[in-house]
Amino acid sequence: MKPSGYNSRYGMFASFSDDVPEGKFQFSASDDILALGFEARCGSEILRGYVPPEDSTAVAALREAGGSLVGKTAIDEFKICSFGMTAECGVPRNPYDPDRCCGGSSAGAAAAAATIPGHVALASSSGAGINVPASFCGVYGLTPTWGRVSRHGLIDYAGSCDRIGLMSADPADFRKLLPRISFRDPRDPSSMAQPDLDLGLGAPKSVAVFKDWEWMVSKEVRPIFENALAELGDKGVRVDAVELPSLRYAVAAHRAIAAAEGSTSLARYCGLRYGRQDGDLSLGFDEYFTNMRSEHFGMAAKFASVFGTYVRMMDVRGSYYMDAVAVRGALVAEFKRIFENHDAVVLPTVPTVAPRFDEIKGLGLQESEYVETLSLPHGLAGMPHVTMPCGYASGMPVGMQLLADHWKEGTVIAAAEAWSKSFKTIKPGAVK
Amino acid sequence: MKIGLEIHVQLPTKSKLFCACPTSGDDLPNSRVCPGCLGFPGFKPTLNRKAIEYGLALAKMFGCTIPEASWFSRKTYFYPDLSRHYQGTQFAAPIGSNGTYALGKKKIRIRRVHLEEDPGSIRRVGDGSALIDYNRSGVPLVEIVTEPDLSSPAEARRFLADMLRDVRRTLGMRDDGDRTVRCDCNISVGKERCEVKNVTGLRNVERCLQYEAVRQTRVLKAGGVVERETRNYDEGRKITTSARKKGYEDDYGYIGEPDLGVFRPRAMAESVCATEMSSDIVGRLVGDYGLDPKVAEQIVHTSCRMASLFTTVADATDTETSRYWVMSVASDHKDALDAISDAEFGDVSVIAADLAVKQKAGEITDTECAIRMGCLLGGEDTPECSVARGNLEEIINRLIDENPGVLGDYAKNEKALNRIIGLAMRETRGAYSSSEVVLTAKKLVEARL
Ligand SMILES: [Zn+2]
């Protein structure tokens, strides 16, 4: 089937090309990753018409590796939300149940990886943006260490959190392709400090799990993850319970940091130079850009702009932004302590399976935060992690995530590969 | 009266602060831009290391505290010439703080020295619309902020002139006139201060401060209250006008720039040479060498290499000898001296001192010394001196034969002799002292009259 066929079924693409050359592996890029020949709207109407002047480093590297870019996948507006429902191009449908969401922000990437045979998706995250949709759509999702993959050409939201990663139904793709997109790139200074990628690391022999994970997840997820832990034990992996006191502050801290940075990243959009530029030019500048932002930003970008601006204002930055920065430091220290005695940390990826659209509609902002609670601690800490399918509840995939210390992508990739050897993935459509 | 200044100086880097676009060259609007300095989504800033080194050189010159770690911040405001709607600047961790500048005997405290990028520029066109040129977008600036330690407009101007001379020397910049400096001027006559934004050039700074001082004094004398506000300076009418009232501090919502990360100024500063402020050098020349303060100032203001040459020669001889050679021969070769490398200059200074020692000891004549030192400092080959000695009287007699017109001219004006003296000096290349040549020429010419 051609990309258009998949797209009409699942709505995963923001833009695509049916002109697929033979003999190349196919990949997609989320719509915040620039690629020549494709518009980059980043899930937002305000960027309609933005055709980038060059490829992002990651896209160029995969093309170089023999890949063919078939399309740009739908993401939540500026990767802000976590259900995959705010993209300007429409809402992708979960391959396992069209009435359920894909999760966000890299919603379309997960749907593409789950449905298109042999497909590899370049996806992005500014917190839990790879974890959540990969878990909801039953695929493997790799989020490398912050600074591992050059973000030259990634439209930014929260610079200190933004990362590019990979999604695939087969984690062997990670071993094959991560080295192709991991290198020091002078055009993204954050990539210059990375040590060499070591894919010789073995799968973890001892893992830690948060002591209180059980009451943090739904009752359908609980037995599945329990089984997964037992299976790890059977394979000879030591599993210990540990505490992570700062975990409870992670979501709030991430909100403050991501929105504070995000509100500055979003400041540039004013309807000039790129994207929508069709406002009333007879207006003064202030009125012009206010109108353009009011009309063409979605609710997600508007909320992030207002909230993010607030938390960095002089009178309150001490109690919001600066506290959040302190929490981030504490989280890194707590994780480092855990990694003194363990190779990795395992957790359920999301506390639930993918919710139905009608369930999401009723959720307020705070109620929907639960989706990210188990991903944001390491999202803030910038550590590499992988999510993998570990079971199915009422036909919907459940994800398990495994994270390792900074720069140890080798550990999480080895873990995912080992897991995939014995875990039987059930393809969408095959489950009742 | 209290005056504090915030001074912006463009750093002489070849490329911009956060991208590789050139800082000078083609002046066609928007010809020196890239997606980065145009603020296109997806493009990350990269840091120009040279700009940081320049900033550190200035921080060192002011004797600032240099932090272990520093970073850039985003200063957010919406204005069309600011391509990303945030300016890359330094907020919490400037590369220098708590320095001083010696203005004569007075210490002016320097609160901070930090780096930032310039926005683009706006040109308003007749029909009410505006054109934006992003060529300047991202050009590196250093901002130097003083404490309110200046007490008159004239002093502020003098401070600016002296300090900028030191800044230019430290950065290896040519004196490109007053216009390149941009200042925000804070002035209070009573309790409340006003800030006059974006004043260009020394003369305007002094004038705007004079105007403000008079204005505020009048308000206070009339029993009024000076309101805290931002004002603009109208260069044409030479007055300041109110821009906006300032009941509160501007709030730019600064946060750290996540895309550039942290850099280590203190470690970097080790390899950056500190330059001495010119007032310190003047003080040293007067204090350690007993040089007349006026002469010391003249030497330092000519060029700091001149001052350095003076000390090297004076250390080898004495103050008066060194003063003579520096003021006579060396000042003619100021530009050539400024053009050579530090190492070359060091060698040249030592050889010059050696020549002065030889002349003082009578081993070479003053003329020979002047010629050789001139060639040395001017970068020419040193002539062979003692070889061409020959008989002075013969040489001068021949020169008179070759230039018979001199005799008639000399009868009318004694200065005509200089022609023969000059030719003789060139030919004998310093083998005879200048007084010897003059006396001989005079004697032989007069003998023929
Ligand atoms: Zn540029």
Image: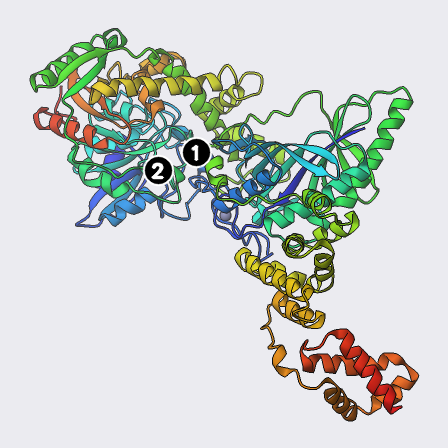
Q: Is residue A316 above or below residue B158?
A: above
Q: Nearer the viewer, residue B138 or A107?
A: B138
In the image, what residue type sits under mark 1? Gly
Q: Which numbered marker is on residue A193?
A: 2
Give the distance between the C-alpha atoms of the residues marked 1 and 2, in whole angstroms.
Answer: 10 Å
The numbered mark 1 sits on a residue in which chain? B
The numbered mark 2 sits on a residue in which chain? A
Q: Is residue A352 visible?
A: yes
On the image, the x and y values in percent for residue A147 come to 34, 35
Which residue carries the number 1 mark? Answer: B261
A96 displayed left or right of B256: left
Residue B78 falls in which quadrant of the image? top right
B449 displayed left or right of B292: right
On the image, the x and y values in percent for residue B235 come to 79, 43
A131 displayed left or right of A263: left
Looking at the rendering, in which quadrant would you find the C terminus of chain A?
top left
Q: Is residue A422 above or below residue B336?
A: above
Looking at the rendering, in which quadrant would you find the N terminus of chain A?
top left
Q: Which numbered marker is on residue A388?
A: none
Q: How is the image coloured?
A: rainbow
Label 2, secondary structure: give it: loop
In the image, what residue type sits under mark 2? Ala
* C-beta proximity under 8 Å, tags 1 and 2: yes
Q: Is residue B38 visible?
A: no
Q: Nearer the viewer, residue A223 or B23?
A: B23
Q: Residue at the spot x=80%, y=83% of the render?
A: B441
Q: Nearer the viewer, residue A65 or A117?
A: A65
Q: Is mark 1 within 8 Å of ligand 1?
A: no
On the image, the x and y values in percent for residue A411 come to 19, 29
A349 displayed left or right of B25: left
Q: Residue at the spot x=81%, y=79% of the render?
A: B439
